[in-house]
Image (tube, coloured by chain):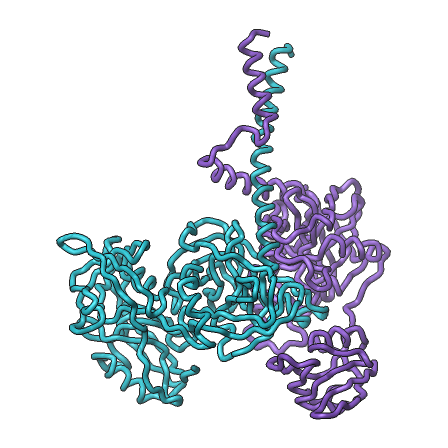
Chain colours: A cyan, B purple
């Protein structure tokens, strides 16, 4: 081969090899980044008996799911490596399913900085840290001492602003999340906390990861943080704009259309009008009624928000100091319990505003936005009528609900849902 | 050589030698990374694939798959071993094959190993390690390809790994990608990964991006598998544990599942801020019951060794054997009482 051709061939080979090395380097860099994030985030991990938590301040503030510490005021917390602390529940939000703990006598702890969950993009890598099946903290799975080493799994963000039960704006991920992961952090590749993992989709009652997991977004928790700190172990109530009846039809991204505003209601006094299209809250765009309800659910009661509304004559900003969601009422502990908050629906029937986690309603598949039309064949004219009918049953009895469910981009459908009524668990 | 060719050659050489090769701008990096990642797992699998074999086992009788467990009738099907081959890894040129003990458990009539070239050979079991869930087989062969072993010092949580098996198609390896989820399960003998494990790739190879063997795909070392479906939790026998027992198995020796001691008490998990192990339940017919332990007792020492909490107590007890007698000091109200307890055998 002539020298010129040889040199060119060699040069070309080197260039091609360079590209392969570049690709390999990209992968090794990504691998190194994941290893680094896993290492740092694991040092901020907290074992909470049957669940997980994450340290978010050097003096021992720990975030977890509310359901991990339900009914518990004080819990033993072990950090990675087994270091022992007593954690006290400082404040909780049971519907959004998160809680703040404070570790006693803690200082100089490794903690995870909180990131911007609103900056997440579908498809980006995220890491879940948790303790599935108690693999890290129980010396019973294997007959060997516990290593207090958490489990690290890798996945992507597969969806954003998901509405599932009380999780009104959840991050969806396919990172492996199992029983025991609840309360643990979802971390971005910059090593920042973007969510608290708490819910998984399961089938055939097989409570094992199947590719769909949900995390409470950090943005929601941040809005509650100062109130959680002052809650003295109690509940921080959710915000709401009562009195709005939204049009339950797809608007093609044009916002949440207000059907009617109840006269004299909170929404009426704030200045909302029938026909308004709600298109934004603060920096958030609102494409649909589902997103509007979901977003309002991420603010605590008392928060001041600016709601952007489009009218025939232009856009207007309505300042709102959010009211408290839900109705406080006397509850008979032995009465049949469904597990929802409801409102009279526009045009008759009862609209489900909130489905509480871990309730008969959630188990039966009732969804927020469903309009209950009938119960056991009898028309459900309004909330009072529905509540009266439920009261005639005992916990454990089944009822058949006829429900109208809106679906984006399609005709609303009518479903029959059988619910086994339960007992109020508190 | 004319100036143009020289300049061109020079440019290519520079491109090849420059750090990062051909410069990738921001817009180009993401797709480049995406294809690089797929290629990376593909090439790692390609390197190990010749060393991964299919293992077909002919049985007279299988282990029940739920031994010692109270399993409802409809779930027995769920835990039954499906038909089809499992996997194994060649560990010597002359035909030593490593697989999981579960794969060759039961009353085995014959074992057939199929290599990547399609050749099938009869295999016999040399030795099993029931504790680590390993089995060493032997086939008659020469010049088989063997893996490169990873250095345990390089193991890190978060590193990419690929699970490579040879089932159900014996002619083609399967590749499942994931990361290392934990390194110190079961006394650091197992590593955990979210790369998908299943009955088919069980006994196969877990490799890093360089195609080096970091572990053997196994389930756990229990007598029955904890699956029905993969849930993102897979346990592999670590390369250092394998290298430790390989010489023993090669000699034809076997390691039985150790008998674990058993007291017969249940923990009061609500008792925090307690110096000791607080007992909530005492089971009938156990050593604890016979010794006179009562619900509410706080165990503060075992054979004179102070007990700080429940986990510490279990660690102390597990260093003993069934049949051994231990002295258990309990705080009962105001007093400390010493009880003599004969340890039973832990049910599996």
In the foreground, B332 or B118: B332
Residue closest to the far right? B251
In the foreground, B71 or A420: A420
The residue at the point 61 percent across, 71 percent down is: A105
Position of B54 relative to B65 (above/below): above
Asked if residue A271 lies left or right of residue B265, the reply is left
Residue closest to the far top? B2
Query: Could you tell me if residue B85 is visible in this image?
Result: yes
Asked if residue A423 lies left or right of residue A267, the reply is right
In terms of image quadrants, where is residue A180?
bottom right
Asked if residue A31 lies left or right of residue B303, the reply is left
The residue at the point 58 percent across, 61 percent down is: A44
In terms of image quadrants, where is residue A256?
bottom left
In the foreground, A175 or A283: A283
Residue A390: x percent and y percent?
Answer: 31, 84
Query: Could you tell me if residue A362 is visible in this image?
Result: no
In terms of image quadrants, where is residue A161?
bottom left
The residue at the point 45 percent across, 65 percent down is: A201
Q: How many numbered marks have been drawn onto this rendered protein structure?
A: 0
Residue closest to the far left? A313
The residue at the point 31 percent across, 89 percent down is: A392
Residue A422: x percent and y percent?
Answer: 40, 83
Position of A9 relative to A300 (above/below): above
Residue B5: x percent and y percent?
Answer: 56, 11
Q: Quick one: quadrant of the C terminus of chain B? A: bottom right
Residue A123: x percent and y percent?
Answer: 45, 49
In the foreground, B226 or B77: B226
Q: Quick one: quadrant of the N terminus of chain B? A: top right
């Amino acid at each position: 081969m002539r020298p010129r051709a040889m040199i060119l061939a060699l040069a070309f080979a080197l260039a091609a090899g360079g590209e392969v090395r570049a690709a390999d380097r990209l992968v090794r860099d990504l691998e190194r980044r994941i290893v680094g994030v896993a290492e740092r985030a694991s040092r901020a991990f907290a074992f909470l008996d049957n669940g997980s938590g994450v340290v978010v301040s050097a003096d021992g503030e720990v975030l977890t799911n509310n359901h991990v510490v339900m009914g518990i005021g004080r819990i033993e917390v072990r950090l990675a490596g087994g270091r022992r602390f007593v954690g006290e529940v400082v404040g909780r939000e049971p519907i959004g399913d998160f809680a703040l703990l404070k570790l006693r006598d803690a200082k100089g702890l490794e903690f995870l900085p909180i990131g911007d969950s609103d900056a997440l993009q579908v498809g980006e890598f995220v890491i879940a840290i948790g303790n599935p099946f108690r693999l890290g903290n129980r010396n019973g799975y294997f007959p060997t001492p516990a290593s207090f080493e958490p489990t690290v799994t890798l996945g992507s963000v597969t969806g954003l602003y998901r509405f599932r039960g009380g999780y009104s704006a959840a991050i969806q991920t396919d990172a492996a999340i199992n029983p025991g992961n609840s309360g643990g952090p979802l971390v971005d590749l910059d090593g920042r906390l973007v969510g608290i993992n708490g819910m998984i989709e399961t089938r055939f009652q097989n409570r094992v990861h199947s590719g769909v997991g949900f995390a409470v977004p950090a943005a929601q928790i941040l809005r509650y943080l100062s109130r959680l700190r002052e809650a003295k172990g109690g509940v921080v109530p959710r915000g709401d704009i009562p009195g709005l009846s939204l049009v339950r039809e797809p608007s093609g991204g044009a916002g949440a259309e207000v059907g009617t505003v109840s006269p004299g209601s909170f929404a009426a006094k704030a200045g909302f009008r029938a026909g308004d299209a709600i298109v934004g809250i603060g920096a958030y765009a609102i494409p649909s009624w589902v997103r509007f309800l979901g977003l309002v659910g991420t603010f605590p009661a008392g928060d001041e928000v600016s709601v952007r509304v489009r009218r025939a004559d232009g856009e207007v900003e309505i300042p709102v100091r959010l009211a408290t969601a839900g109705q406080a009422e006397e509850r008979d502990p032995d009465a049949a319990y469904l597990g929802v908050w409801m409102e009279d629906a526009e045009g008759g029937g009862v609209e489900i505003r909130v489905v509480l986690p871990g309730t008969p309603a959630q188990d039966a598949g009732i969804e927020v936005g469903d309009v209950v039309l009938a119960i056991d064949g009898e028309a459900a004219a309004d909330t009072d009528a529905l509540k009266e009918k439920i009261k005639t049953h005992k916990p454990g009895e089944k009822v058949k609900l006829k429900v109208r469910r809106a679906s984006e981009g399609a005709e609303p459908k009518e479903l029959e849902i059988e619910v086994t009524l339960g007992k109020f668990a508190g | 050589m004319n100036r143009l060719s020289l300049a061109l050659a020079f440019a290519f050489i520079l491109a090849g030698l420059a750090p990062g090769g051909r410069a990738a701008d921001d817009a180009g990096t993401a797709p480049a990374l995406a294809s690089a990642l797929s290629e990376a797992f593909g090439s790692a699998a390609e390197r190990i694939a010749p060393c991964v074999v299919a293992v077909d086992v002919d049985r007279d009788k299988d282990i029940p798959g739920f031994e010692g467990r109270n399993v409802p009738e409809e779930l027995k099907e769920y835990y039954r071993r499906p038909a089809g081959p499992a996997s194994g890894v060649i560990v010597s040129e002359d035909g030593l094959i490593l697989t999981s003990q579960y794969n060759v458990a039961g009353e085995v009539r014959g074992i057939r190993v199929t290599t990547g070239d399609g050749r099938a050979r009869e295999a016999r079991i040399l030795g099993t390690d029931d504790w680590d869930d390993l089995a060493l087989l032997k086939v008659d062969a020469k010049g088989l390809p063997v893996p490169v072993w990873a250095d345990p010092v390089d193991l890190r949580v978060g590193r990419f790994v690929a699970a490579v098996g040879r089932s159900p198609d014996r002619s083609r390896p399967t590749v499942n990608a994931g990361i290392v989820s934990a390194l110190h399960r079961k006394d650091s003998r197992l590593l955990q990964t979210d790369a998908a494990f299943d009955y088919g790739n069980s006994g196969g190879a877990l490799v890093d991006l360089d195609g080096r063997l970091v572990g053997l795909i196994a389930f756990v070392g229990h007598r029955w598998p904890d699956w029905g479906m993969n849930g993102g939790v897979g346990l592999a026998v670590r390369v250092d544990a394998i290298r430790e027992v390989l010489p023993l198995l090669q000699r034809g020796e076997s390691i039985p599942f150790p008998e674990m001691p058993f007291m017969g008490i249940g923990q009061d998990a609500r008792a925090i801020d307690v110096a000791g192990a607080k007992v909530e339940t005492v089971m009938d017919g156990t050593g604890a019951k016979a010794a006179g332990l009562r619900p509410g007792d706080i165990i503060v020492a075992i054979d004179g060794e102070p007990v700080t909490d429940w986990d510490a107590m279990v660690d102390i007890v597990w260093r003993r054997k069934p049949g051994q007698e231990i002295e258990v000091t309990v705080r009962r109200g105001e007093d400390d009482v010493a009880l003599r307890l004969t340890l039973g055998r832990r049910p599996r």
